[in-house]
């Protein structure tokens, strides 16, 4: 599939590089082809192409958003998605690793508000970028689980397929408003790893019977 990445820093690059190696075509969506992260990503993976943001959205089957949350409203409002799937990989983070929207509404629902003609799926936020570039755990016979949320079943099915390519099992947690709980899982993971000394390579598993 053709995948456009708005944001190709730590998270965007980890996902894009993993997916390119699984056979997907990666388009970096940035209006400045000389931006630091675009140049660095191109050096690390010369197979990535670059287009201005709206042109990349137009060309892509699926669009990933991996930007600082604070830039999202200004970035998204002028864009046209024409019903495409938009994967929200961003997290609103406030002071002291708190929820940046006061836990009143998820960042993903704000993304949907700012991009009303997109089909937003929340994914790839419950772990750090380290697990996105390498989600392989050879000593276990279960795969790490990626929790997702969204209102559109077809879009979630596409993300389920990309998760399989990346190396994750998928747990569909339900409608987009469930993203608030996923964003709190993010805060839990970040506090445990970035502040609490746990390994950045630990993941959650989904075991059932
Ligand atoms: N770091 C993690 O482990 C992690 C894990 C899960 C989720 N997240 C979330 O993922 C998002 C990205 O985090 P990150 O760590 O990958 O950040 P990062 O390394 O700083 O990368 C941010 C990317 O966004 C681009 N960008 C910034 N403003 C832009 C704009 N107005 N238009 C287009 N592109 C713009 C930057 O491009 P430039 O080169 O122009 O600056 C860069 O490519 C955040 O919301 C974060 O909370 C992070």
Image (spheres, rainbow, N blue to C red):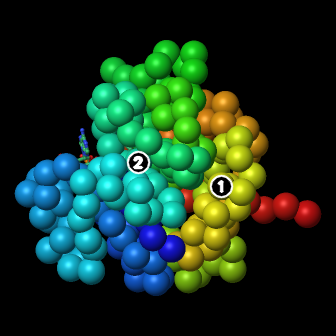
Q: Residues within 10 Å of mark 1 (few under 14, many from 20)?
A: some
Relative image position of residue 157 (x, y in whole percent): 70, 61
Q: Residue at x 37, y 23 (%)?
A: 94
Residue underneath mark 2: 65
What secondary structure is found at the residue carrying circle 1?
helix
Front residue of 197 and 4: 4
Task: Tell me which label, 1 or 2, sits earlier in the chain.
Answer: 2
- Give the image location of residue 35, x and y in percent: 11, 53
How far across and down, in percent of the image, does residue 93 sit? 39, 29
39 horizontally vs 113: left or right: left
Residue 51 occupies which quadrant of the picture? bottom left
Q: Nearer the viewer, residue 196 or 56?
A: 56
Q: Is residue 189 visible?
A: no
Who's the residue at 31% across and 28% down the image?
74
Residue at disc 2, secondary structure: strand
- The residue lying at 42 percent from left, 23 percent from top is 100
The answer to which quarter of the image holds residue 191 is: top left
Q: Residue at x 44, y 42 (%)?
A: 80
Q: Is residue 106 above or below residue 147?
A: above
Horizontal side, residue 169 vs residue 84: left or right: right
Q: Which residue is mark 1?
A: 155
Would you say 99 lies left or right of 95 here? right
Q: Quadrant of the C terminus?
A: bottom right
**Mark 2 Cβ inside 8 Å of ligand 1:** no
Where residue 159 appears, as percent x and y from the top left, is 61, 61
């Amino acid at each position: 599939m053709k995948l456009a990445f708005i944001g190709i820093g730590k998270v965007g690059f980890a996902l894009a590089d993993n997916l390119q190696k699984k056979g997907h075509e990666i388009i970096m969506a940035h209006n400045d082809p000389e931006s630091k992260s675009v140049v660095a990503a191109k050096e690390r993976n010369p197979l990535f192409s670059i287009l201005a943001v709206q042109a990349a959205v137009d060309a892509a089957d699926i669009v990933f958003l991996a930007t600082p949350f604070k830039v999202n409203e200004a970035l998204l409002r002028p864009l046209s998605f024409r019903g495409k799937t938009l994967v929200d990989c961003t997290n609103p983070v406030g002071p002291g690793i708190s929820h940046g929207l006061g836990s009143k509404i998820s960042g993903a629902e704000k993304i949907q508000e700012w991009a009303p003609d997109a089909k937003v799926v929340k994914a790839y936020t419950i772990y750090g970028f380290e697990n996105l570039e390498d989600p392989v755990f050879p000593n276990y016979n279960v795969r790490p689980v990626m929790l997702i949320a969204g209102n559109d079943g077809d879009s979630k099915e596409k993300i389920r397929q990309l998760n399989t390519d990346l190396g994750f099992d998928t747990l569909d947690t339900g409608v987009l408003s469930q993203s608030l709980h996923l964003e709190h899982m993010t805060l839990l993971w970040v506090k445990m790893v970035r502040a609490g000394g746990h390994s950045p390579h630990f993941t959650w598993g989904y075991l059932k019977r």
